[in-house]
Amino acid sequence: MLDFKDQTPIQPGYEEDFALWLDAQAALLRSGQFGQLDIENLTEELHGMSSSLHRELGSRLVVLIKHLLKCEFQPKRKSRSWHSTIHEQRREIDALLETSPSLRHRLPEYCKKAYPHVLKEAANETGLPDASFPPQLPYTIEKLLNADFLP
């Protein structure tokens, strides 16, 4: 937001009005007024945005893998809802990777990290013992992201 008298951005406090603060920071960047930027809070927000994308990718992988396991190990209970969830997670993962392609190389790491949690959740949701599921992720990254793959 600008003060129309002198055309300088109004400097709202970060904690007073977050939306207005963001607008003011963007205006300062656009106008090259780098010395007036709230560097400390901008740095925190940018780091938070990056962390959020990483968490979202991990979370979506958990849901995707869990539903693939449920489809494979409870085939008689497959439902449109499970298929819909699988499709939605793949679509959202694709969107994340499209806007942030650097996340693609983190997929193996995030899958490996997520799998122990997936096993617990899948066992809990299916009522099957943990040992019913493979100890290692049974799907390649290519299969996880393949819209036509269903176990």
Image (tube, helix red, strand yellow):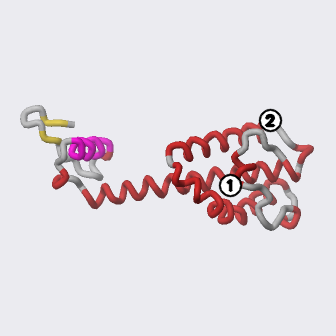
Alpha carbons under labels 1 and 2: distance apart: 19 Å
Query: Residue 62 in the image: x percent, y percent?
Result: 68, 55
Which of 151 and 63 lies nearest the eye of the viewer? 151
Residue 38 placement: quadrant: bottom left
- Is 84 rendered above or below residue 32? above
Query: Residue 122 in the image: x percent, y percent?
Result: 78, 57
Residue at the far left in the pictured view: 5
Residue type (three-letter) at the residue carrying disc 1? Val
Pointer 2 local density, CA inside 10 Å: few below 14, some 14–19, many at least 20: few
- Is 91 rendered above or below residue 134? above
Residue type (three-letter) at the residue carrying disc 2? Arg
- Report the disc number at residue 95: none
Left or right: 136 as drawn, with respect to 47: right
Query: Residue 53 in the image: x percent, y percent?
Result: 51, 52
Q: Is the magenta stretch mostly helix, strand or loop?
A: helix
Identify the magenta region. 19-30
Residue at the far right in the pictured view: 76
Left or right: 56 as drawn, with respect to 133: left
Label 2 sits on a secondary structure element that is helix
Q: Which residue is pictured at 71% across the width and 62% down the height?
A: 115
Query: Residue 79 in the image: x percent, y percent?
Result: 83, 38
Residue topped by disc 2: 80
Q: Which residue is pictured at 45% across the width and 55% down the height?
A: 50
Left or right: 127 as drawn, with respect to 82: right
- Report the disc number at residue 62: 1
Q: Which residue is pictured at 79% across the width and 43% down the height?
A: 149
**Sequence order check: which comes first, mark 1 or mark 2?**
1
Pointer 1 local density, CA inside 10 Å: few below 14, some 14–19, many at least 20: many
Label 1 sits on a secondary structure element that is helix
Q: Which residue is pictured at 56% across the width and 47% down the height?
A: 97
